[in-house]
Amino acid sequence: MTPPRLENRLPPEDLLERDEHPLRELAWLMTASLALLAVLVLLTGLSARWLAPRLPFAYEAALAQRVFGAPAPATPEAAQRRAALQALADRVAAVMALPPGMRVVVADEPSDLVNAYATLGGRIHVFHGLLRRLDSEEALAALLAHEIAHVKHRHVAANLGHGLAVVLLLSVITPDGAAQAAQGLLTGAAQLALLGYSRDAERQADAEALAASLALYGHAGGIGALFTTLPQRDAPAGTAWLSSHPDTAERLAALRSAAAARGAALGGPATPLPAALRPPPAPAK
């Protein structure tokens, strides 16, 4: 059999007379590359979002310990408030069927923000701005149940795993910038939860808060009061699908429907928030 002949062929004689722009092929190549990268980012993020919550919670707790360390020393009043918060959180968690080995740790933060969040390793933070607005133990318990639900269903791990996976993938293109982004994502994990979870995750946490409220107090008055206390998240008409959170009206409607389905009351006796749980007054401006 005769081996194939190798030769250097000359370029076509009409190469320079063709109508195609010399940059057109480059543009197509760049577009295809960006499209492929977008698909890889999407698939990587979704895979990590699925995998991260399935890792043992002990790994997440160990990571939180390395990132955040031990809490700063507190004044006697702050230590008493933190102990009271933890005691209430433990009561709430006891009726929420947390997986074995999972525990939440609650702390308050001296900020005027009207918010609370759950972060890595079952750590939950409640801002003084929100504590000052809550008038009852039932409302605070509903808030804690909502945040504990995010821990129970590993919503924080899913969000963080998604972000880290995307950063690692992008490091193939910009190693230095991606490394800095990964470091920032880890050290900023506490703020990550403030950006919000998916609407489905929020609905799941609301349902858990309702169930915990009914188990502890026999009515849903606390969660109803909580929804009317939190900053309104109502989206402009036609744009609700852009928001990560269901809007307030939708959440209240879902609460009424779920409570009615359980034959539960939307209101009931309210226990005044104990003095130990009240933060100091906001500093005068």
Image (cartoon, rainbow, N blue to C red):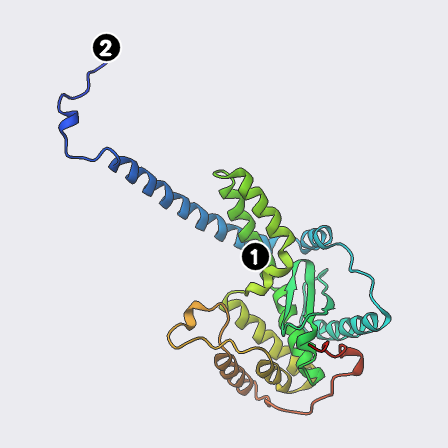
Q: Which label number is shown at residue 242? A: none
Q: Residue at x 73, y 60 (%)?
A: 101
Residue farthest along the front direction in this orientation: 285
Residue 266, picture quadrant: bottom right
Going by the image, does 44 lie left or right of 208?
left
Q: What amino acid type should be assigned to the residue bearing mark 1?
A: Ala
Residue 3, picture quadrant: top left
Residue 183 image point, x, y percent: 62, 47
Residue farthest along the right direction in this orientation: 76
Going by the image, does 20 lie left or right of 67?
left
| Mark 1, other Cα within 10 Å: few <14 / some 14–19 / many ≥20 | many
- Residue underneath mark 1: 158
Q: Residue at x 64, y 72 (%)?
A: 113
- Residue underneath mark 2: 5
Residue 240 image point, x, y percent: 42, 73
- Mark 1 vs mark 2: which is more N-terminal? 2
Residue 194 image point, x, y percent: 59, 65
Q: What amino acid type should be assigned to the residue bearing mark 2?
A: Arg
